[in-house]
Image (spheres, helix red, strand yellow):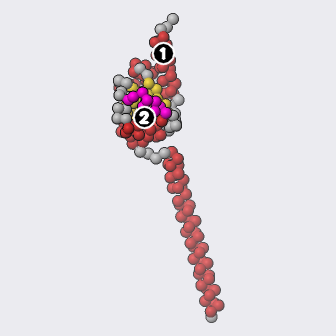
């Protein structure tokens, strides 16, 4: 019979592996010095962004990263670390994290993994400056709509000038 600690570690490692498979992005944060209510607040803030925070022992995280062939992230797992798994797009969770670090300087962004690319703290901060997915979609629609709108306006002006020209010819003929 296995000891309870070993069973818990195995379950945690399996949970991390499953979360890695189901996530588009993983962020690593150091939370030493952050109070428990603040961590709960961070968890609540991450939920609407499609992400969740998982605190685990470093040895378990290292084993999970090693078995998932992401050994390069192992160097970021030191001290009190938390893993943030983002299911959808990584921009919204990065905004939440950067806003939270402004108010709670004890939380440190260490890096992460998006798709198949390793990212650093500066990458997370630049991602947080990006507009949301809805705003980007609106900008693309406007960019696609712009040439069509310009063509419609041009054709409308040509027709308007043609009508003005015909009206001036009519006025000239009626006055003669």
Furthest residue in direction top, as rendered? 1
Query: Which of the two discs, 2 and 1, sits closer to the camera?
Result: 1
The secondary structure type at the circle numbered 1 is: helix
Query: Relative to 21, is 61 on the left or the right?
Result: left
For label 1, the crowd category at 10 Å Cα-Cα, with few meaning under 14, some 14 to 19 and many 20 or more, is: few
Residue that label 2 marks: 117
Q: Examine the rendered structure and indicate whether residue 11 appears above or below residue 84.
A: above
Label 2 element class: strand
Count of marks overlaid on the render = 2
Q: Is residue 135 above or below residue 74?
A: below
Q: Is residue 19 magenta?
A: no
Identify the residue shown where x is 46% and y is 33%: 41
Q: Quadrant of residue 160?
A: bottom right
Rendering coords of residue 171 (x, y %): 62, 87
From mark 2 to mark 1, how far is it between C-alphas? 30 Å
Q: Residue at x 59, y 84 (%)?
A: 168
Residue 36 drawn in magenta = yes
Note whether residue 4 is visible.
yes
Label 2: how many residues lie within 10 Å, few (<14), some (14-19) or many (20+)? few
With respect to residue 88, does 165 lie above or below? below
Mark 2 and mark 1 residues within 8 Å of each other at the beta carbon: no
Q: Which residue, given by chain and number where applicable, does mark 1 sit on?
A: 8
The span picked out in magenta is: 34-44
Image quarter where the C terminus lies is: bottom right
Q: Earlier in the sequence, mark 2 or mark 1?
A: 1
- Residue 141: x percent and y percent? 54, 53
Q: Is residue 93 or residue 21 the one in the foreground? A: 93
Q: Position of residue 49 (x, y in %)?
A: 50, 37
Q: Main secondary structure of the magenta part?
A: helix
């Amino acid at each position: 019979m296995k000891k309870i600690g070993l069973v818990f570690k195995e379950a945690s490692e399996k949970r991390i592996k499953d979360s890695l498979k189901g996530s588009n992005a993983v962020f690593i944060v150091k939370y030493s010095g952050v109070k428990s209510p603040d961590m709960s607040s961070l968890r609540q803030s991450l939920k609407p962004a499609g992400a969740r925070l998982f605190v685990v022992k470093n040895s378990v995280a290292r084993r999970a990263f090693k078995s998932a062939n992401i050994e390069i992230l192992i160097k970021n797992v030191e001290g009190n670390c938390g893993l943030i798994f983002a299911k959808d797009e990584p921009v919204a969770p990065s905004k939440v994290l950067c806003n939270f670090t402004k108010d709670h300087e004890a939380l440190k962004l260490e890096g992460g993994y998006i798709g198949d690319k390793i990212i650093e703290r500066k990458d997370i901060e630049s991602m947080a400056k990006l507009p949301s997915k809805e705003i980007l979609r609106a900008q693309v629609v406007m960019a696609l709509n712009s040439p069509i709108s310009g063509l419609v306006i041009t054709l409308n002006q040509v027709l308007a000038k043609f009508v003005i020209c015909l009206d001036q010819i009519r006025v000239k003929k009626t006055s003669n």
